[in-house]
Image (cartoon, rainbow, N blue to C red):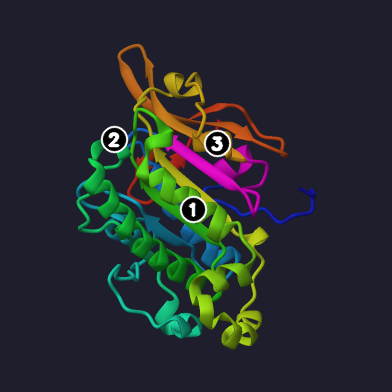
Amino acid sequence: MEPSVTRLQTGIPRLDELLGGGLLPGTLTVVMGATGIGKTQLGLAFADHGRQQEGERGILFDLTARGDSQNHQAYAERICNWQLHEQCVDATLVPEQVWDKSLARRDYLHIFRQSGRRVTAGDMDSDAWREWKYEQAKKLDRAIAFFYGNLANGVRRCVIDGIEPVTKAADSIQLEMFDYIYHQILHKEHDWVARDLFRVGFREHAERVEQHAYDHKAVACLLLYTSHEVMLDDLITRPIESGDELSNANTIILMGKTREGNRMGRALHVAKHRGSACDESIVPFQISETGLILDQS
């Protein structure tokens, strides 16, 4: 990665300092920590800052499979004064409509809404697994349309939330879908994503595909990954297993609880920032009505 590449700022100045100016486009960043530690607030700040830096806010793709979503709507309105425009997971979008910004440009998609699915293959018997694979194929078609429609209309930041902790990462249905999205949509040439969307109809749309070309290497992906570990020290010493997305990430930001005497706090640590100098400090932070506030010292 050339030093002259424009970094994508997170919208949190102190965090950008730790990251040597921000995140590198075309790479994967994993933000890891327990439920309620502040991952979603960080993700929203990053997505919202796209409006200032690139002229388009980022998008949020919610993979929550158990229960409700992560309350993104309320967080976005309170923290960023941003009213999320949600894409209905069952909406019937004619493929050609992806170039109509008023129809295709959507901020948020909760792909497993009302699916009632568990998050590992081991949770299901053979019949339930076949049913899931059929549903997964339909969900992937919707995901391709959602991401392509946004990227073709100027979006360069993707935040993926709702990854829930599992005993073995390789068994996670959510991580399986994320792996497809990252490698087959976000990390793929725009015309090949369009081929997957239009299939046999691609040739007749090839000219418009080129008119809406985008560079996938300019797209940044932020994966919000919920951990079993609560304490920051435990996250820092956590081993990386085969199939774990941490092994593929360019940047890893850990967020966890800290303890000093009889007082609990929160802190984050940039554990990995490949190809870039970074500050390895453990930085305390607080969650306010306007998002994360990092200690300046």
Work out whether mark 2 precedes mark 3 in sequence or the reverse, and give the earlier one. 2
Residue count near mark 3 (Cα–Cα under 10 Å), binned few <14, some 14–19, many ≥20: many
Q: How many marks?
A: 3
Which residue appears at 54% of the width and 76% of the height?
A: 153
Observer-side mark, 1 or 2, equals 2
Give the residue at mark 2: 122
| Label 2 with label 3: CB-CB less than 8 Å | no
Q: Amino acid at mark 3?
A: Ile
Please indicate whether residue 77 sits to the left or right of residue 279 in the image.
left
Q: Measured along the vertical axis of the image, is residue 139 above or below residue 63?
A: below
- Looking at the rendered structure, the secondary structure element under dot 2 is helix
Residue 96 percent location from the top left of the image: 47, 85
Q: Which residues are magenta?
A: 14-32
| Label 1 with label 2: CB-CB less than 8 Å | no
- Looking at the rendered structure, the secondary structure element under dot 1 is helix
Please indicate whether residue 130 sits to the left or right of residue 204 in the image.
left
Which residue appears at 56% of the width and 73% of the height?
A: 194
On residue 252, the disc is: 3
